[in-house]
Image: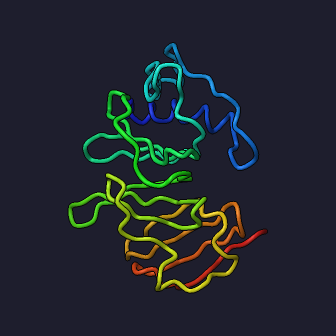
Amino acid sequence: MKRTLLLAAATTLPGLLLGHPHEGTAPEGKILTVAVATGTGDHRYENVPWWGTTRNKGVGSTNGGVAIDKAGRVYFSTDTPRGVLVYNAAGEEVGTVGPSNIHDLFIREEDGKEYIWASHTAGKRLVKMTLDGEEVFKIPNEKTAEVKGGWNGVTAADLAPDGSIFIALGYGSNFIHKFDAEGKHIKTFGGKG
């Protein structure tokens, strides 16, 4: 598991350090073609060259959303038309799911089934999908009233143990909105400081 997470981080880090896709075109990143070690003592890791890439082609601009399902597949959010990239544990791309330009994502299990929750910045929404990308829920929806600051900049989200949903607007108003499990707005907090 440590190795898989390191591999995910190693392929995502160049995009995080070298580009900011919200302002122009991101520069070309460098693909790690040799093993690079990092850390000390019991916390020493080494990347696997070419993991998570197609030869001479990187994953594109990313914002660091990485999740691993129970089967060991790794999901990367991208700021590209390809949406969420899916890799097997060996680092081979096995597909793409979801809409384009996903900022962040996480996977949660409900009643024995895993779902991807994705912050869809370009779509100004949070979307819940099956692992194969079928949309099953979104906020805003018909139960969601207009929120303070609007929907520009949906960059992160999380679920509370009670089913509440939190959505952060990192590139917009900097507000955090709390919703019930059906998408009804409960409260807003935060804002530009």
What is the total number of numbered labels drawn onto the structure image? 0
Residue lying farthest to the left in this orientation = 112
On-image quarter of the N terminus: top left
Residue 180 image position (x, y, % from top left): 44, 81
Colouring chosen for the image of the structure? rainbow
Residue 156 image position (x, y, % from top left): 55, 60
Q: Quadrant of residue 190?
A: bottom right
Q: Quadrant of residue 120?
A: bottom right
Quick check: 134 left or right of 176? left
Residue lying farthest to the right in this orientation = 193
Residue 31 image position (x, y, % from top left): 56, 22
Query: Which is more toward the observer, 43 or 54?
Result: 54
Task: Identify which residue is drawn at 65% across, 63% down.
Answer: 153
> From what the image shows, is residue 164 above or below residue 130?
below
Task: Identify which residue is drawn at 29% across, 40% down.
Answer: 72
> From what the image shows, is residue 149 above or below residue 157?
below
On-image quarter of the C terminus: bottom right
> From what the image shows, is residue 168 above or below residue 71?
below
